[in-house]
């Protein structure tokens, strides 16, 4: 028995602009238009002519009847149920992400409430990680996220759950594609860049995890940052897996029909439970190797080195950096090296700002500025400099 959608509230929920984009992307041709009232569409399939009159305003008296007729026509031409077509029309302006938990715990299609909350929160973090990487790629986004990413996340919506284990659907909005005038170069909208980045990042993270498990090397993770892999994405995937232990993660994307789909990455990635420890370790290494940007180091110069004809000298400074005791190498130009020389000769503390990078067991402060002597005692005076564990970066 075929199900027909006749409920007025349901039919009124359809958006004419999105329906028109769906028709165009599904091979229908616009053959007529009463501007602001309706548009006429035609399609030939297997020798049969199909026609649709699409109302363009909700306040038209026959809006619901026209939408009902349209669903019947689409049912005949696509050989699909009205329920399936109706679901696609409602989400025509979104790329639909499906996150499926596959395992014994989810065979009934349900989850414990606490696990469900953690699952949804982690799904949000998966999308946010991709949204950040779509703005600019980096290994970690520790605190402040790009404004464009957080603004986009407010537009992302949860869809209806689906049958088949436990399936969470996330609707990621993308605007419909319009034909560009010849003078304009096509530019992909940010919403589509997010989902493109997400699926490329998931595929890269899966490959990097397999590679790391076999070789013990982090290198493929490091080179996957430009594809959107980050500590944030790895953490979010781990939390998804841990929310429902001993389940596989099956993430797939149904690309919106409102935009072209050429050149898009693979639309599915599966992570088995044994992937999680590797992803967790990758997230830790991403964070550990991420520079701490624009930090202040206060302490004492304990070593100086510079070649006879070299313009850049090397200073080793022991002190406090963001509240932690550190020894760090700082490469200094001639003027700053002279200040460091005064500091070590007169046993004066110094202050310097820059980006702190962990290299092996040591640290390096890069992009140094405001390197200056301090006349007053500092908290660094209480540090046991000789007792610091230190390995000079190569």
Image: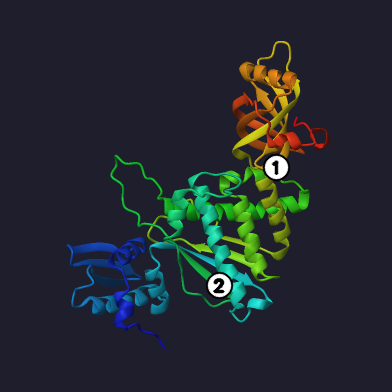
Q: Regarding mark 2 in the picture, which secondary structure is present there? A: strand
Q: Quadrant of residue 7?
A: bottom left
341 sits left or right of 61 in the view: right
Front in this rendered view, residue 64 or 143: 143
Residue 68: x and y in percent read 29, 79
Residue 324's label in the rendered image is: 1
Above or below 186: residue 49: below
Give the labeled residue for mark 2. Answer: 167
Residue 206: x and y in percent read 65, 55
Residue 53: x and y in percent read 23, 71
Q: Residue at x 55, y 54 (%)?
A: 129
Q: Residue at x 43, y 56 (%)?
A: 152
Q: Residue furthest left?
A: 34
Q: Regarding mark 1 in the picture, which secondary structure is present there? A: strand
Above or below 159: residue 317: above
Whichever of labels 1 and 2 marks the residue nearer the N terminus, that label is 2
Front in this rendered view, residue 141 or 97: 141
Q: Residue at x 36, y 77 (%)?
A: 75
Q: Quadrant of residue 72?
A: bottom left
362 sits left or right of 85 in the view: right
Dot 1: within a 10 Å radius of its alpha carbon, few (fewer than 14), some, or many (20 or more) residues? few
Above or below 340: residue 256: below
Q: Quadrant of residue 372?
A: top right
């Amino acid at each position: 028995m075929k199900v027909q959608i006749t409920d007025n509230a349901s039919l009124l929920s359809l958006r004419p602009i999105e329906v028109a984009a769906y028709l165009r992307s599904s091979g229908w041709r616009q053959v007529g238009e009463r501007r602001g009232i309706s548009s006429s569409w035609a399609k030939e399939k297997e020798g049969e002519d199909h026609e649709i009159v699409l109302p363009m305003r909700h306040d038209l008296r026959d809006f619901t009847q026209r939408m009902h007729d349209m669903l019947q026509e689409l049912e005949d031409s696509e050989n699909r149920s009205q329920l399936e077509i109706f679901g696609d029309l409602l989400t025509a302006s979104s790329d639909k992400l499906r996150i499926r938990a596959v395992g014994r715990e989810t065979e009934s299609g349900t989850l414990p409430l606490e696990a469900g909350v953690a699952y949804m929160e982690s799904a949000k973090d998966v999308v946010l990680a991709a949204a950040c990487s779509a703005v600019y790629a980096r290994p970690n986004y520790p605190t402040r996220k790009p404004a464009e990413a957080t603004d986009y996340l407010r537009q992302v919506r949860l869809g209806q759950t689906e049958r088949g284990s436990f399936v969470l659907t996330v609707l990621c909005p993308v605007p419909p594609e319009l034909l560009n005038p010849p003078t304009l170069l096509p530019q992909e909208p940010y919403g589509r860049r997010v989902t493109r980045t997400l699926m490329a990042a998931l595929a890269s993270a899966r490959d990097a995890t397999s590679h790391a498990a076999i070789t013990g090397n982090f290198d493929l993770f490091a080179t996957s940052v430009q594809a959107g892999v980050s500590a944030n994405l790895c953490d979010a995937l781990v939390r998804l897996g841990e929310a429902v232990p001993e389940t596989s993660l099956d993430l797939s994307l149904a690309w919106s029909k409102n935009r072209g789909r050429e050149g898009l990455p693979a639309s599915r990635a599966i992570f088995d439970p044994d992937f999680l420890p590797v992803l967790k370790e990758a997230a830790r290494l991403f964070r550990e190797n991420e520079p701490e940007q624009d930090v202040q180091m206060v302490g004492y110069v304990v070593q100086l080195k510079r070649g006879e004809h070299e313009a850049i000298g090397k200073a080793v400074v022991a002190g406090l950096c963001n509240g932690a005791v550190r020894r760090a190498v700082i490469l200094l130009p001639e003027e700053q090296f002279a200040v460091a020389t005064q500091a070590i000769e007169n046993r004066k503390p110094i202050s310097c700002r820059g980006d702190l990078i962990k290299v092996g067991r040591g640290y390096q402060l890069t992009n140094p500025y405001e390197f200056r002597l301090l006349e007053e005692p500092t908290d660094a005076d209480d540090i046991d400099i000789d007792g610091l564990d230190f390995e000079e970066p190569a």
